[in-house]
Structures are given as structure tokens and as C-alpha cells.
């Protein structure tokens, strides 16, 4: 007999504007306590040093998390010139010092080299596994971590502020999955013949979730376990806005729930969302008119 899951059935998304100094896991814990949801997960980790958009999936929305983790993200970040750290940000130990501060024109001149599909080596302090262990765990033990370069996509990169006196420059970047902003700042500095590390990092958008629809963790805590907290939860389908929706009949919905396929020759090919009226039924794949479910929602 299946064990009954603790908590209440809550399905949807909360978009938290994560403050500095706390982990993504702590945000998840706070959301779980406030909403009393049976299941909670986050769409893309933010380091304690970083602030900004942290989408939190509740209940059946956790089935849509891969589409959020893999979506386009936007960041504002500041590079402090002249120093490199072992973590490529403020939290690490200084490993190189005495580098120069480049001028704005120099920085602008190299930005085209960092747009499009580029090769990037992740920072040593990352969650990538090396021989079964997290890279950051090995780095903290003093071991040399060598990570392989990977292709990433930088869709746009611009300078939004430059302060030569403070020795720092602020950027805006829109990027694809797998991008490490700490590595981006490090590599821009090296290309300019100097050192650099991230001194500020703020995530502005994750897929459909932006600051305009976010809520602070403090405000969520103030709302408490109440109807007011539930009122700020976004529908599960918010994460699937970019995926074509296809309406199905009641018999067709029953077939999908039973694990059967559908013949829908007029439906758009590829990934689609099957809708039973206003209720999301499943994420499915349409191959030559044969539709098979990938994730069925228990709504």
C-alpha cells in the first residue's frame, strides 16, 4: 500500500526573488513550510552570492522543471578587474593580483567574441561531477580540478555600466543552458590581458519568469500559511507557455491517462501540451501524427 504523502496538494509555480546570503535549498524549505505543499523543487540553483529569480515548482509543476532549467536566462553581473579568485567570485581566495583595469572601449571591442556559440570551461567550484564527486567538493579539499570545455550559447552581451575608478564593469547577458557567468567574467578578463572575478550577480529572468512576477521571500513568509500565500502561486501551465497546446476529447484524455497513444494527424509535430478543457493533461510528443505522453499530470 502506497504511503500517503505529507502536506497538501498544491500545484503551480512561485517565483521568488532570492536575497543574497542564503542557499536555494533554504528558499525551498521556506516555501515548503509556508505553503505546506506535498512536493517542492527549484528550477535552477542560485549560489548564496547571487540574488534574483528562483522559480519554485509545487506539486505537479515539478514535472515541468526540465523545461525551465533548460530555458533562456538573463543576468546582470559585475566584474571586478585586477584580481582572480579560485572560485571566480568574491567568496574565493585571491590567486592572482595586480592586473590592470581595462577601459570601456577595450571591453566593448571584445564582446562579439563572447556571443553566439562559444566554448567555456566551467569554474572549479561548480556542481559538475568529476569521477563521481562534485567539483566544488574536490576544490574545497585542495585538489586540482580540471574540467573539460563545453559549448554554450550567449545570445546577447552588453555593458550597462563602467567605473574605472572603482575598477569594475557591469554587464547584461542573455544565455542558454549550462552557462556559468563566473566563467564568462573570468574569460573576458583574460582576453583583455588582465584578471577578473564576479562581485555582483543577479538573475533577472528564467524562461517565462521575470522580476515583474516575482515575490520576495520576506513577503511570502509574512503572508504565512494562508489563502493569501496561495493567491500568488502561478498556474502550472505558466512554464509551458512556449509549447503548443492541443485540446483533446474526454475519451482521448482517458486513453492518455491509461498510457495509450493517440492519432492526431493535424496536431503540431514535436513537443506539445495536451489540454483537457482548461486543465493540462500531459506533456506529449507528436511523431508523424502519433502522440505519446511523456509526463502525465495528476490534476
Image (cartoon, helix red, strand yellow):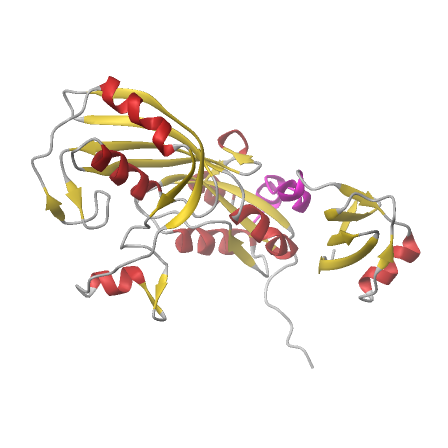
Which x, y percent locates residue 31? Answer: 50, 51
The residue nearer to you, when weighing 152 against 18, is 152
Quarter containing the C terminus:
bottom right
Quarter containing the N terminus:
bottom right
Was residue 237 drawn as part of the magenta stretch in this picture?
Answer: yes
Image point 45% across, 56% down: which residue? 29
Question: Is residue 62 depicted above or below 195 in this figure?
Answer: below
Which x, y percent locates residue 147? Answer: 31, 57
Image point 30% across, 61% down: which residue? 135
Which x, y percent locates residue 196? Answer: 20, 37
Is residue 185 left or right of 294 when viewed as pictured?
left
On the question of residue 247 being in view, the answer is yes
Question: Is residue 50 depicted above or below 25 in this figure?
Answer: above
On the question of residue 282 being in view, the answer is no
Was residue 234 drawn as part of the magenta stretch in this picture?
Answer: yes
Which x, y percent locates residue 149? Answer: 35, 51
Image point 58% across, 36% down: which residue? 208
Is residue 145 left or right of 292 when viewed as pictured?
left
**Magenta stretch bounds:** 225-241
Image point 76% across, 46% down: which residue? 269
User: Which image quadrant for residue 112?
Assistant: top left
Is residue 55 left or right of 158 when viewed as pictured?
right
User: Which image quadrant for residue 243?
Assistant: top right
Question: Is residue 165 depicted above or below 196 in this figure?
Answer: above
Amino acid at each position: 500500500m502506497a504511503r500517503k504523502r505529507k502536506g497538501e496538494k498544491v500545484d503551480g509555480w512561485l517565483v521568488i526573488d532570492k536575497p543574497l546570503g542564503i542557499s536555494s535549498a533554504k528558499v525551498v524549505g521556506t516555501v515548503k513550510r509556508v505553503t505546506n505543499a506535498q512536493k517542492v523543487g527549484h528550477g535552477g540553483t542560485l549560489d548564496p552570492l547571487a540574488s534574483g529569480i528562483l522559480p519554485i515548482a509545487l506539486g505537479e509543476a515539478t514535472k515541468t522543471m526540465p523545461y525551465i532549467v533548460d530555458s533562456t536566462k538573463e543576468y546582470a553581473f559585475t566584474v571586478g578587474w585586477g584580481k582572480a579568485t579560485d572560485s571566480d567570485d568574491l567568496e574565493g581566495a585571491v590567486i592572482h593580483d595586480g592586473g590592470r583595469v581595462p577601459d570601456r572601449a577595450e571591453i566593448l571591442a571584445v564582446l562579439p567574441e563572447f556571443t553566439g556559440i562559444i566554448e567555456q570551461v566551467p569554474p572549479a567550484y561548480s556542481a559538475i561531477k568529476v569521477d563521481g564527486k562534485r567539483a566544488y567538493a574536490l576544490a574545497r579539499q585542495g585538489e586540482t580540478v580540471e574540467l573539460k570545455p563545453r559549448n554554450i550559447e550567449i545570445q546577447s552581451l552588453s555593458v550597462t555600466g563602467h567605473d574605472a575608478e572603482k575598477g569594475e564593469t557591469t554587464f547584461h547577458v542573455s544565455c542558454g543552458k549550462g552557462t556559468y557567468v563566473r566563467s564568462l567574467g573570468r574569460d573576458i578578463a583574460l582576453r583583455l590581458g588582465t584578471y577578473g572575478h564576479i562581485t555582483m550577480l543577479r538573475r533577472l529572468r528564467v524562461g517565462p519568469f521575470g522580476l515583474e512576477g516575482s515575490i520576495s521571500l520576506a513577503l511570502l513568509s509574512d503572508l504565512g500559511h494562508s489563502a493569501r500565500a496561495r493567491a500568488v502561486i502561478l498556474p502550472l501551465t505558466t512554464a509551458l507557455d512556449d509549447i503548443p497546446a492541443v485540446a483533446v476529447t474526454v475519451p482521448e484524455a482517458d486513453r492518455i491517462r491509461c498510457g495509450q497513444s493517440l492519432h492526431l494527424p493535424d496536431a503540431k509535430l514535436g513537443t506539445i501540451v495536451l489540454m483537457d478543457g482548461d486543465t493540462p493533461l500531459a506533456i506529449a510528443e507528436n511523431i508523424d501524427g502519433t502522440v505519446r505522453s511523456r509526463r502525465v499530470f495528476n490534476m
